[in-house]
Image (spheres, coloured by chain):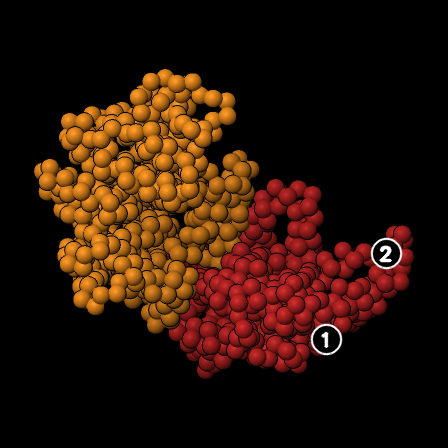
Chain colours: A orange, B red
Amino acid sequence: MTMRFLHSCAVALALLVAWPAQALTADEARAMASGETDDRVAAINKAVPTADARTAEFFQAMADDAVKTTPGRVFVMKDDQGFDPVSGAEARVPEDAEDIVNNNLLRSTLESAMAALRLTSTDEKVRGDAVQTLLNEPDESRLPLIERALAAERVPAIKARLERVRAASMLDSADRARRIEAAGTLAGSGSPEVKLLLNERLAKEDDVEVKAALVAAVRRIDDRLVWGDRINAVFSGISLGSVLLLAALGLAITYGLMGVINMAHGELMMIGAYATYLMQGVFQRYLPEAWFGGYLIAAIPVSFLASALVGAVLERGVIRFLYGRPLETLLATWGISLMLQQLVRSLFGAQNVGVENPSWMSGGFTMLGNVSLPWNRIGIIVFAVGVLLAMGWLIGRTRLGLFVRGVTQNRPIASCMGVNTARIDTYAFALGSGIAGLAGCALSQIGNVGPDLGQSYIVDSFMVVVMGGVGQLAGTVYAAMGLGILNKFIEGWAGAVLAKIAVLVFIIVFIQKRPQGIFAMKGREA
Amino acid sequence: MTAVTLPTKGPLLRGKGWTAFFVALIAVCAVAPALNLWVSADSPFHMSDYAVALTAKIMCYAICALAMDLIWGYTGILSLGHGLFFALGGYMMGMYLMRQIGRDGNYKSDLPDFMVFLDWKELPWHWTFSGSFAMTLVLVVAVPGLIALVFGFFAFRSRIKGVYFSIITQALTFAAMLLFFRNETGFGGNNGFTDFKRILDIPIATQGTRMTLFVITGLVLLGCFLFARWLIASKFGRVLQAIRDAETRVMFSGYNPLPYKLTIWVISAVMCGVAGALYVPQVGIINPGEMSAANSIEIAIWTAVGGRATLIGPIVGAFIVNGAKSWLTVAYPEYWLYFLGALFIAVTLFLPQGIVGLVRKWLAPGDRGAVASDDARHEAQRALAAGEGMEPEALPPVGVTAAAVGGIETKGARA
């Protein structure tokens, strides 16, 4: 609020310096604040090219609903005090003064009007945002203002966008040469909004030549958009793939290496997500607000340990009695998953809990007109790669990894060599569970955290492991990425549900053809 | 070497068995209707409508459990997709019941309400036969049967077994659930079918109709039981059990397991479909939730609780688990999942033979040795298999000498 006020002051100051403006008159103020919506819109648009500091303040006041009217006068309200918009002097507000009512059309008009005034702001970011706002709602009446701003603009990026706004504002011009010129300029843009504007004009256009120019412009934009769509599909495919990978990596150890059908895997992910939620609570309550963004970093080891601990208890308590009996393991771990779900429901309630993105994970970065990559998705891809590398190192390079591989390959010989196989089983299972916890921590950033979180991933993660080939880390990676990208591409033309079904059917058919997965285990069994 | 005596084919049921069977038959066909329809509501012997509905529902579940037992208990193939066949049977019956509503729906249209809502002008192609009761009965058998046949053929031909099979059946029912959730599929989307009014032009909600459906369900259950009994005692059933215990050996003996597995798989699916078709008119609703993975796994637990590879076991299991469910979800709703979860763990850890196995052990202490040696052999086989990283069937059967059992057990503890 204060910021906005300061802003409008700065804008007003800039305006005063920039060009001789005509002062706001009482009649203008009345026309803008009361009457029919269409008349008010017209009045506001009329006031923009000649606006001065008072007009800017008045726009802001109207946008903030801080204006009252009586049939004869208009008041700007500040801290329950009335001020005259023209002179700025304090004025007594009569009892019967009414608040102004702004509908959506008025609000967007006010917004673009203020944006037009901000075009002369000295702050680059403010100018950039103002240009963006204007591009969504172009209006011919602002053309002089835009041209003046264009002449003054020095930053090339903003200048290019201003050109586009100018062209967009000329689209509805009465002069057909200007319309053709506008279409030509706009063709260089690659944004879906511009395409929409062009299409809107195309529907209204009567002139054949202009029509042809518009069609050509739309086609050129389409060409650029296609690339954007492709990049989007690949990116969301990789993003889904890395989610699948995270979900399946833990399972690649517990199922892939150890052969335990762990139906509670999803619930171990859920525990990781809830651990993240708890860390968020701790940071909110006990630590300074500025540190809040760090909760996610702190949550990574906590969610790993929480799930690893639960996993170790499960292995010691139930699963070790069931080695070599896969179907029984399946049923027992399903039972465990039901109990864990209910436990979470009793502790945290059946509703989803809210896990916020820290500020450095929200927002995104724009690559092309229609390609914007959210930070949290990028974060997950990076995280998945990190977890994968860490796991590869742990299994391939450490003593624990050596023991795990040894016990998987030949239990009796490993035992003869003095490896405590029972303990290695527990460690390996805890490791797999901990990685599930990490997956849960990551998932809390992109989806709902609730007792059912695990259920939605369990079928998928088994599919990935089975498809990649049991006991094959590389296979798991290829399968996760392949399925993710396949899913997103089918989604593009068939919708999310059909894509999911198609992928499941594909996996079923694939397993029929190649039961050993993409990569067959090398060795005696192969 | 003593001459091998082939087991002779036993009678369908022995004396006591027939007695119990006829007691059950009379209870379903005469006692229950009498207690419900003709004993006054104040009498302690009155069977309330709630009890009738609940028992009927559980009897449908028991048919499913029996079907699961045939495929899992006797053939060793754990299906996590039986909920799909149950729901398909239910949907076939549901389509007929929706057509029976006629113009009494909210929109007073010939089309079912949800189609009016979606602004469809005519019935989609797969509703072609839904107007006829006879065709519906055919579809109830044919649709789950056909889907099971196609899926089973490809799965068994590629020799997918064990956990792989379980997981892809789960994927199958999951995919079907997603499909049925879509409005465009033409099965009522999320809400499925409900608000049934008539069956065969008779109002469906009356006490008489409910009792009739109850008796029919009971008869089907008893019929399925006898059929399963006959099937298991036949040569076909013996081959199934041989496939369960050592599939490779069966193949080396000159049998092709594919037709055997496929036949029992289709029979099992059809039984589930019939159960679903009986379930829907009595419960009054069918929606895609029935195809969720959880429902299919629950069928397996009914069978496991009662006792696999016994035929009375699944029925007992279905009654115990679902009885406990309907009591606990009302009395202590938050504890039901703890109970169910604990049941899964306890049965797999401590009761591999289920309740029936436990009772048998108590009743026949002299027989314990035989059971134990059988158990030991299976245990040893599994232990060896785990040690070798192979499927149990792939190994030669283990002899039952005391030394072998003893020797294996130390290994088995860690296997």
In the rendered structure, the residue with mark 1 lies on which chain? B
Seen at 42% across and 29% down, the residue is A72
Quadrant, the N terminus of chain A: top left
In the rendered structure, the residue with mark 2 lies on which chain? B
Seen at 18% across and 59% down, the residue is A176
Counting from the top left corner in percent of width and height, residue B174 is at 47, 61
Q: Residues within 10 Å of mark 2 (few under 14, many from 20)?
A: some
Quadrant, the C terminus of chain A: bottom left
In front of the other: A308 or A126 = A126
Q: Which residue position holds label 2?
A: B46
As helix, strand or loop, the secondary structure at mark 2 comes to loop
Q: Which residue position holds label 1?
A: B200
**Is residue B220 something that shows in the picture?**
yes
Q: Does A338 appear above or below A181?
A: above
Counting from the top left corner in percent of width and height, residue B279 is at 66, 65
Asked whether the residues under marks 1 and 2 belong to the same chain, the reply is: yes
Counting from the top left corner in percent of width and height, residue B151 is at 46, 73
Counting from the top left corner in percent of width and height, residue A25 is at 30, 29
Seen at 36% across and 68% down, the residue is A506
Judged left or right of residue A508, residue A340 is: right
Contact? badges 1 and 2 (CB < 8 Å) = no
**Upstream in sequence: badge 1 or badge 2:** 2
Q: Does B263 appear above or below A493?
A: below
**Is residue B66 something that shows in the picture?**
no
In front of the other: A326 or B323 = B323
Amino acid type assigned to the residue bearing label 1 in the image: Leu
In front of the other: A151 or A271 = A151
In front of the other: B332 or B230 = B332
Judged left or right of residue B235, residue A311 is: left
Amino acid type assigned to the residue bearing label 2 in the image: His
Q: Residues within 10 Å of mark 1 (few under 14, many from 20)?
A: few
